[in-house]
Amino acid sequence: MELLQTLGQLGTVLVQLVMQLLALGAHWILLIIWVAWWLLGVNWQKAWPALRQGGWAPVVLLTLIASLVWSRLQPVSCDCLSFVEIPNFWWQLGYMAMLVALALFCGWLQGVLHWTPPEISLEPPAAAHGDHGHAAHH
C-alpha cells in the first residue's frame, strides 16, 4: 500500500514538473525560436562571407532602426539594474545588440561544431527529357 502512495506522489510531482517546464518554455518561447532559427535554420558558412563583404552594414542599420522605433513605442527608462537607471533608447539598443550578438554566437557555435543545416531546394525537380512516362517500346 505504501508503494502505491509513493508512486502516486511521484506521478503528482512529475505532472507538476512538466507543467512548470511548459510554463518556463512559454515564457521564453520567442528567445527559444530566435536561437533555434539562427542555430538550425541559417547556413553560416554562406552568411559569414556575406557579412564580411558588407552585409554587416544593413544589420547595424536595422538594429539601430528597430531600437529607435521601440524607444518611441515604449518611451520608458529601464531600472532593471539596481545601481543605475538606463535611459530610453539606450536600453533598447543594448537589448537589440544582445539579440544580434546571440545570433552571431549561434553562427560561431555552428562553426565550432562543424555543423550546417541541409540545403533545401525550393525549385521543382527538372523533368527527364528522354522519358515520356511510357514503358519499354518494342
Image: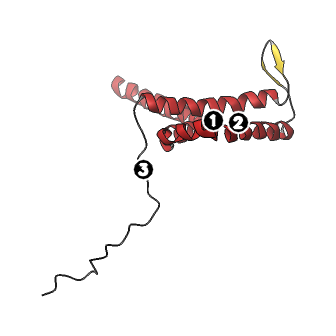
Residue type (three-letter) at the residue carrying disc 2: Val
Q: Which of 113/48 is in front?
A: 48
The numbered mark, 2 or 3, whose residue comes first in the sequence reads 2
In this figure, which residue is indicated by the disc labeled 2?
60
**Residue 19 in view (yes/no):** yes
Q: Residue at x 72, y 41 (%)?
A: 62
Residue behind mark 3: 119
Question: Relative to 128, is 32 above or below?
Answer: above
Instruction: Name which quarter of the figure residue 22 lies in.
Output: top right
Q: CA distance from mark 1 to mark 2?
A: 28 Å
Circle 1 residue: 27
Label 3 crowd bin: few (<14), some (14–19), many (20+), radius 10 Å: few
* Tally of marks: 3
Tell me the element at label 1: helix
- The reply to whether residue 16 is in sight is no
Q: Residue 38: which quarter of the image?
A: top right
Quadrant location, the C terminus: bottom left
Label 1 vs 2, first from the N-terminus: 1
